[in-house]
Image: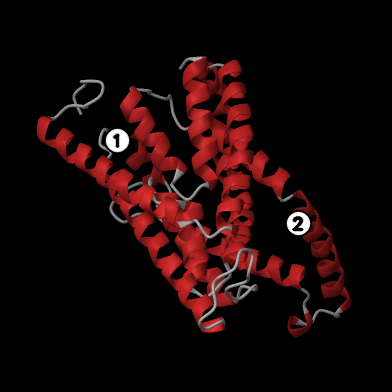
Amino acid sequence: MTIFDAILQGVIQGATEFLPVSSSGHLSISQHIFGIELPGILFDVMLHLGTLIAVVFVYRKLIWRLLKEFGLLIADLFRGRFKWGEMNGDRRLIFMLVIGLLPLFLLFLPIPGTDMKIKDLSEQLASDSSILVEGLALLATSLMLFLGILASRRTAASRAPGKHWARGAKAGRTQYTVADAVITGVTQCLAAVFPGLSRSGSTMSVGLMRGIDQQTALDYSFVLGIPSIAAAALLSIKDAGAEGEAIGTVTLIVGVITAAIVGFLAIKLLKWIVTTNKLSIFAVYTLIAGLAVTGIALYEMSTGQNLFTGKPL
């Protein structure tokens, strides 16, 4: 892998990790188009760490508040002062984040008849010679975004009949329930398995379909992704030695820095898009991209070779 490849992959990862278009799907598709072959998943994991840096920086004030509140929560539990019905917003968010992360343990369930776990499917699907799954998953992302947008508009209309949905107006609930968190967590699991199914897009859309305000759904989706990304990196770090030598230290660093910078800009862009109610841009984009990728995949399956590199599938 060259420095240019690292920058290209970093740009794609940084932009698509937070924009609701699927980073894993776009990375897999770009590697398919440019014939980039990676020795394992270390580089992808390091790119995810770059985007983790970006989201932690953007949400640093909220994260610091949650850490302080977590300390107070532990103290109240030991003193017997904790009451579920009297939680403030930050404490409630901590519980909803924990509940939303619990479904991730489903990824460690074994797949009957194989020696794989559910989480291993993601690497297998992303590294195969076909991009059909990525195309179909992009179409699923588009569908979820369209459903989320329609649900959000219905929620806004029910709260203010006959009035225009003003910029920055709250159009839905601003707090997650246990059911909201569980459904969002299960959705995040599905996004972790299928490259092309956007994690941010699908989890945010589920929140909108549950009647959550757009900005609240967006913030919850981003913060929920922090421990998920960190856990994925820790689970893969054992392979860092041999794979790091094969890729190159400088290449890894360039990719991480690029992903962090572009990721920061992508978060700011998405927050603006949500505020101005232009989320449909991504629904249309993933629809067009999904149709194109699916069509290319079917063509390649019929010819038996990669359309871009000419290599056999």
x and y percent of residue 231 in the render?
59, 47
- Residue 270 picture location, percent across and down: 57, 50
**Kind of residue indicated by mark 1:** Asp
- Residue 212 is situated, as x and y percent measured from the top left of the image, at 56, 72
Quadrant of the rendered image containing residue 163: bottom right
User: From the image, which quarter does the C terminus lie in?
Assistant: top left
Residue at horizontal 28%, vertical 50%? 136
- Mark 2–mark 1 distance (CA, rounded to whole Å): 39 Å
Label 2: how many Cα within 10 Å (few below 14, some 14–19, many 20+) = some
Return the residue nearer the eye: 230 or 65: 65
Q: Residue 55, located in which quarter of the rendered image?
A: top right
Choose the circle earlier in sequence order: 2 or 1: 2
Q: To which residue does mark 1 refer? A: 128
Residue 35, relative to residue 20: is it above or below?
A: above
Q: Please, is residue 15 above or below residue 90 in the view? A: above
- Residue drawn at the location 41% of the way across and 57% of the way down: 190
Q: Give amino acid for label 2.
A: Leu
Q: Which mark is residue 9?
A: none
Q: Which residue lies under the disc numbered 2?
A: 62
Indicate left or right for 80 with 270 as reference: right
Secondary structure at badge 1 equals loop
